[in-house]
Image (spheres, helix red, strand yellow):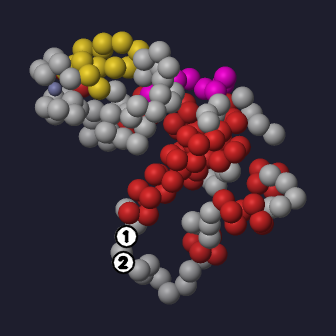
Amino acid sequence: MDFPLLEITDDTLAEQWLHKYFHPHGLHCPRCNTSVEQARRFRKTRRSHVTTYRCRHCDKLYTVYTGTLFANKHLRPTQVILLLRGICKGESTASLARELELAYDTVHHLRQQIQEKAQWRQPETPLLDAVTETDEMFQNAGEKRRKTQWSGGSPASSC
Ligand SMILES: [Zn+2]
């Protein structure tokens, strides 16, 4: 069953969350590194509902997405958060696309990019403990495996 997630979420709160997690040291102008506190709120984007800032120092326009995988994708903040959550929880691309009202190819492409970044950031050092928990072994199991495992229904039905 798909839930109307976008109807029950707040883009303003979601954008504040993205500021905190995408820019833990504060949002800065991508050209001159001046803090967003010194920028002017230029407008809200029509499709993605995020604030565009104009740097008072160099006139560069930027948003919370500038310099991230989500730049120029026109996703609402709630879509980004729910997409990240869904990918982390192993939800299928088709289900995420339907619930978040996105094209399948958009979700598929972003999932690949996110997983590549996550893999690139994995530590090279082995775990310190000698015992591996079962959930550690399957944390990177892909969608293909999941479909086989739950061939009789959706992954959500097993929760
Ligand atoms: Zn600037």
Percent position of residue 134, x then y: 64, 75
* Label 1 C-beta lies within 8 Å of the nearest ligand 1 atom: no
Q: Say above or below: 106 vs 124.
A: above
Q: Quadrant of residue 106?
A: top right
Q: How many marks?
A: 2
* Residue 57 visible in the displayed image: yes
Q: Say above or below: 101 vs 1.
A: above
For image coordinates 77% across by 65% down, the residue present is 148
Q: Which mark is residue 123?
A: 1
Q: Are the residues tagged 1 and 2 within 8 Å (C-beta)?
A: yes
Q: Which mark is residue 64?
A: none
Question: Would residue 1 be found to the left or right of residue 87 on screen?
Answer: right
Percent position of residue 6, x then y: 64, 27
For label 2, the crowd category at 10 Å Cα-Cα, with few meaning under 14, some 14 to 19 and many 20 or more, is: few
For image coordinates 52% across by 23% down, the residue present is 11
Question: Would residue 98 be found to the left or right of residue 127 on screen?
Answer: right
Q: Which residues are magenta?
A: 6-15
Q: Which residue is mark 2?
A: 125
SS of the residue under disc 1? loop
Disc 1 to disc 2, C-alpha distance = 5 Å
Question: Would residue 148 be found to the left or right of residue 101 on screen?
Answer: right
Residue lying farthest to the front in this orientation: 105
Viewport quadrant of the C terminus: bottom right
Residue nearest the observer in this picture, 158 or 94 = 94
User: Which amino acid type is shown beneath numbered disc 1?
Assistant: Pro
